[in-house]
């Protein structure tokens, strides 16, 4: 009874934290650590309880069973890790895992269960011990999860829940005394876990809300609770009425966890905005540290992302570049709780952390190699959310890390024939939501192989960045980013400023005798004047002013520069030319110029970075509510 009341369900808690976006917070990490220790302690106490629960046994037999169980755990701890390590070393990244190793691991789990059952402890204890010793990262662990999880989660686990449900006879709870006993058990379980956790948390000076949230989280029950109860029922320790009461208690405490945590703890609304001054690339102090949040879904976009970050490094005179590399992972029903926690555990840690060096994740290795460059700080991150709200993780992380720009991959990738093919259409909606709610500037990268698979280097690469400038805040932001890229010794910048032909402009526009100094046209002129002044002695920067009569001439000029390495464009440029550039905008997140450069009408192999500058949003009634 003590084990059943005090246990915390580790997998259920991981799922609750992931859905509430608390997995990477201080409370979430503390809850998972406590739940892991709680789980191990519960299994040890369960083994002791099983050893003592045999009818007609003398204390010596119970002691013998416990000592044999301790010896089994000791032998497994000394032998199994070496065997698993040997298997993991023979499973290199990118190659299929030999099925013999998977079968051997499953056979070891069955053998461990058989040994503990023969000792007198339940077979599940042996399987649990073997599961602790199995590696949690690398291709071997991923292959093992992939082979086993569908069968266990899709068939065996539901059958076990059904079996437990069939054993639960709620009709045995009848009368005032039985219902009073149910209330007493629920009160005791909640008081013991919540009050105990809150008391310890407050004694270590944790805020009251966080202490309450931690207490509610630790009170969740799940599969292990049912295992304990089923073992108790098999051993005739629990009768039908007690079993039903305990199952209802487990259901109630688990159901109330999520609403109670939501009610007392809202970390997303506690984010401090103090000191978050640099939300754009264009800034008064260009030498301030630039923070970039780079998002990626798979390994395909990593080479281009790394080359883009390398191009954004700037000069040695600046304070440096800090890059947060966020791996976007979809939270699905198949997500393993252990793997989720393992990925979230190292969220945002620097690469000198020893826990990262033992892994073989090629994403981490790629960014770790790039992070060796001087004055570049790389921090890996993981966002584990459903596709419907993963944009909240991106925006919240950008605000917490005080990023100046978020780089998102376009949801289409280039095929061998040069056409764009949709990877996952859901990411297009994610990009649009980030553009709408972002706390800083946003760049959407249409990847056509920027620099190929090789890293951009000053010694052997001559890349050309082209910035079409029509006007407006987004174009100014795009040009600011292009100017920073031009500081790289291997990159040249070509700026094309489009101007209306004087005759056309006189017919279309009546000049204002009193121009507003805060208008976009005045801001554009001041910005370009400052840009010319700063780059007048830079041979790698070329500014072209092209006078055109209509959008067709502007398109022809853009087509002339189709051999460049990358276009950097504003998402919503301003001016009368813009309307005729792309009459049909298939992807609103790219804007008219970005849509033009990704359509089949412009034969170019250049990547396209579409930039939207952050603009402070005024409060509305919906924001206040």
Image (spheres, helix red, strand yellow):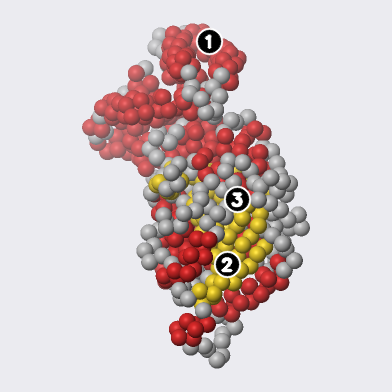
Residue beneath label 3, please? 308
Residue topped by disc 1 = 68
Spot occupied by residue 106 in the image (x, y as percentages of width and height)? 44, 17
SS state under label 2:
strand
CA distance for labels 3 and 1:
59 Å
How far apart marks 1 and 2 lie (CA) works out to 79 Å
**Element assignment for label 1:** helix
**Label 3 or label 1, whichever comes before in sequence order:** 1
Q: Which quadrant of the structure image shows residue 203?
A: top right
Tell me if residue 21 can be seen: yes
Crowd class of label 2 (few under 14; some 14 to 19; many from 20; radius 10 Å): many
Nearer mark to the viewer, of 1 and 2: 2
| Secondary structure of the residue carrying numbered label 3 | helix
**Residues under numbered marks 3 and 1 in contact, where contact means CB atoms less than 8 Å apart:** no
Residue 240 circle label:
none
Residue 525 vertical placement versus 203 (above, below): below
Q: Farthest residue toward the left?
A: 171
Q: Is residue 399 visible?
A: no
């Amino acid at each position: 009874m003590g084990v059943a009341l005090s246990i915390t369900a580790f997998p259920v808690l991981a799922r609750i934290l992931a859905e509430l976006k608390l997995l990477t917070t201080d409370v979430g990490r503390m809850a998972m650590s406590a739940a892991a220790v709680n789980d191990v302690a519960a299994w040890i106490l369960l083994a002791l309880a099983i050893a003592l629960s045999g009818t007609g046994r003398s204390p010596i037999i119970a002691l013998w069973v416990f000592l044999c169980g301790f010896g089994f755990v000791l032998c497994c701890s000394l032998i199994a890790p070496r065997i698993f390590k040997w298997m993991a070393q023979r499973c290199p990244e990118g190659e299929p895992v030999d099925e013999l190793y998977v079968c051997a691991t499953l056979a070891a789990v069955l053998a461990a269960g058989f040994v503990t059952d023969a000792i007198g402890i339940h077979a599940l204890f042996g399987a649990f011990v073997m599961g602790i010793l199995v590696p949690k990262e690398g291709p071997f662990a991923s292959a093992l999860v992939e082979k086993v999880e569908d069968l266990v989660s899709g068939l065996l686990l539901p059958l076990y829940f059904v079996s437990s449900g069939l054993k639960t006879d709620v009709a045995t709870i009848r009368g005032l005394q039985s219902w009073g006993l149910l209330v007493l058990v629920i009160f005791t379980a909640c008081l013991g876990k919540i009050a105990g956790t809150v008391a310890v948390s407050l004694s270590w000076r944790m805020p009251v809300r966080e202490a309450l949230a931690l207490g509610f989280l630790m009170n969740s029950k799940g599969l292990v609770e049912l295992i304990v109860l089923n073992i108790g029922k098999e051993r005739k320790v629990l009768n039908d009425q007690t079993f039903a009461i305990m199952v209802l208690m487990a259901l109630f405490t688990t159901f109330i966890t999520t609403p109670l945590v939501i009610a007392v703890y809202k970390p997303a609304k506690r984010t401090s905005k103090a000191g978050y001054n640099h939300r754009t690339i264009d800034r008064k102090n260009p030498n301030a540290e630039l923070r970039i949040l780079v998002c990626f879904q798979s390994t395909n976009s990593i080479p281009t992302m790394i080359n883009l970050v390398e191009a954004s490094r700037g000069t040695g005179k600046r304070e440096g570049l800090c890059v947060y590399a966020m791996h976007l992972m979809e939270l699905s029903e198949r997500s393993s709780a252990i793997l989720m926690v393992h990925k979230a555990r190292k969220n945002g840690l620097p690469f000198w952390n020893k826990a990262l060096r033992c892994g073989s994740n090629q994403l981490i290795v790629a960014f770790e190699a790039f992070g060796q460059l001087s004055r570049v700080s790389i921090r890996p991150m993981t966002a584990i959310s459903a596709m419907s709200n993963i944009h909240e993780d991106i925006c919240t992380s950008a605000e917490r890390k005080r990023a100046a720009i978020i780089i998102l991959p376009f949801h289409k990738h280039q095929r061998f024939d040069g056409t764009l093919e949709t990877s996952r259409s859901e990411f297009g909606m994610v990009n649009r939501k980030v553009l709408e709610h972002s706390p800083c500037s946003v760049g959407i990268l249409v990847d056509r192989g920027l620099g190929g698979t090789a890293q951009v280097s000053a010694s052997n690469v001559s890349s050309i960045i082209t910035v079409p400038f029509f006007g407006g805040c987004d174009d100014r932001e795009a040009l600011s980013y292009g100017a920073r890229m031009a500081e790289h010794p291997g990159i040249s910048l070509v700026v094309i400023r489009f101007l209306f032909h004087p005759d056309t402009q006189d017919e279309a526009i009546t000049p204002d005798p009193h121009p507003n100094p805060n208008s976009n046209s005045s801001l554009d002129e001041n910005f370009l004047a400052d840009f010319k002044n700063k780059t007048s002695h830079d041979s790698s920067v070329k500014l072209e002013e092209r006078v055109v009569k209509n959008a067709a001439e502007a398109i022809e000029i853009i087509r002339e520069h189709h051999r460049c390495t990358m276009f950097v464009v504003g998402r919503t440029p301003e001016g009368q030319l813009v309307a005729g550039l792309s009459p049909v905008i298939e992807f609103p997140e790219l804007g008219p110029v970005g849509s033009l450069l990704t359509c089949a009408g412009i034969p170019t192999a250049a990547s396209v970075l579409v930039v939207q500058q952050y603009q402070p949003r005024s409060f509305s009634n919906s924001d206040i509510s």
